[in-house]
Structures are given as C-alpha cells and as structure tokens.
Image (cartoon, rainbow, N blue to C red):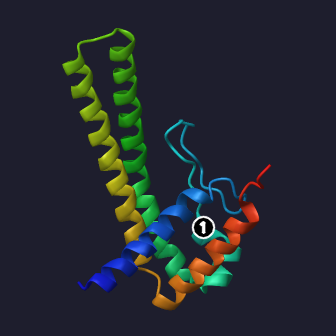
Amino acid sequence: MTKTMRGHLLAAVILLTGTATGYAQQAHAPVTPPAPSFTQPQPFAWWKSEQFQKEVGLSPEQCTRIDNVFQSTLPKLRQGHDELDKQEADLSKLIEANADEALVAKQVDRVEATRATLGKMRTMMLFHMHQVLTPEQLAKFKVAHDKWLQEHRPKPR
C-alpha cells in the first residue's frame, strides 16, 4: 500500500471515528445505548439518518451492511467498556489505598492495554464501515460531516 493510499485511508478512518462518536447527541435514529459510562460515548447510527443517507447517497443495501458491521461489533465494544471500567475501578482502589508503586504501575498497564484493545476494535469497526462506501461517497460524507459539525459545535462564549 502506498503512502498516499495509507494517508487517505487514515484520514477516512479518522473522519469516520469522529462521526461515530461526534453524533452521540443528534436525535436522528438513536441506537439503544448501553448503561451510561464516563468513558463510553453514546453511539449514533449516522447511516440510519435520512440526512446522511441522502447527502452521502447511501443505498439501502449499504445501510444494512454498515449496520451489520456495527451490530456485530457493539457487544464486543460493550464488553470492552465494562472491562475498562473494572480495570479503572481497580486502579482507583490501589491509588486510594496508597499501594506500592509497582502494583499501581502494573494496574496502569492493564488499564492502558484494555483501552488500546478497545480503541483498536472500534477503529477496525470504522474501517469496515469505510469499506462499504465508494470514494465519491467518502467525499460526500466528509462534506456532510463538516456541515454537521458547524451546526452542532457549541458556540464560544
């Protein structure tokens, strides 16, 4: 894979990453969220949004394929978030107990390894969603995403 192709792929994955988490507050086609967690953003099914379907030109078959990717990954993401919450709670207990630095460092490693696994899983999900879209649709998606960000970003005070 050339550097240019990798760069385009990385940009698309980053774009989709921002979209998947950035739309958490949008009301269109909400996904039933898991129990609230500080570390877990609420998902937004952008591919079910009429606005995105129209602006990106998604076919019903593409929407189904993207939803299948999401639905097959969601249980693993929830399990990963539960594990991360548990590991972070264990770390907090060690810190509150003023535990030995080596024990705290070992638990930090567990927390960060769990976080990395979760991030990789999420990024791969977004990569598989990206593979459903054509290059033209990815370009349209970027425009729709940028528009959505302009409309939904909090105004500076």
Please tell me whether residue 129 is drawn above or below residue 82 in the rendered image: below
* Residue on which disc 1 sits: 46
Q: What residue type is labelled 1?
A: Trp
Residue 72, horizontal then vertical, whole percent:
40, 59
Which residue is depicted at the point 74% across and 54% down? 154
Which residue is depicted at the point 63% across and 59% down? 23
Residue 113: image quadrant is: top left
Apparent side of residue 124 relative to residue 148 in the rendered image (left or right): left
Residue 124: image quadrant is: bottom left
Apparent side of residue 119 relative to residue 133 in the rendered image (left or right): left
Q: Which residue lies furthest to the top in this view?
A: 97
Residue 90, horizontal then vertical, whole percent:
34, 21
Please tell me whether residue 82 is drawn above or below residue 145 in the rendered image: above
Please tell me whether residue 146 is drawn above or below residue 72 in the rendered image: below
The residue closer to the viewer here, 134 or 116, is 116
Residue 29, horizontal then vertical, whole percent:
67, 62
Residue 3, horizontal then vertical, whole percent:
28, 82
Local secondary structure at mark 1: helix
Q: Which residue lies furthest to the front in this view?
A: 157
* Res. 129 in view: no
The residue closer to the viewer here, 49 or 141, is 141
Q: Residue furthest bottom?
A: 136
Residue 106: image quadrant is: top left
* Res. 97 in view: yes
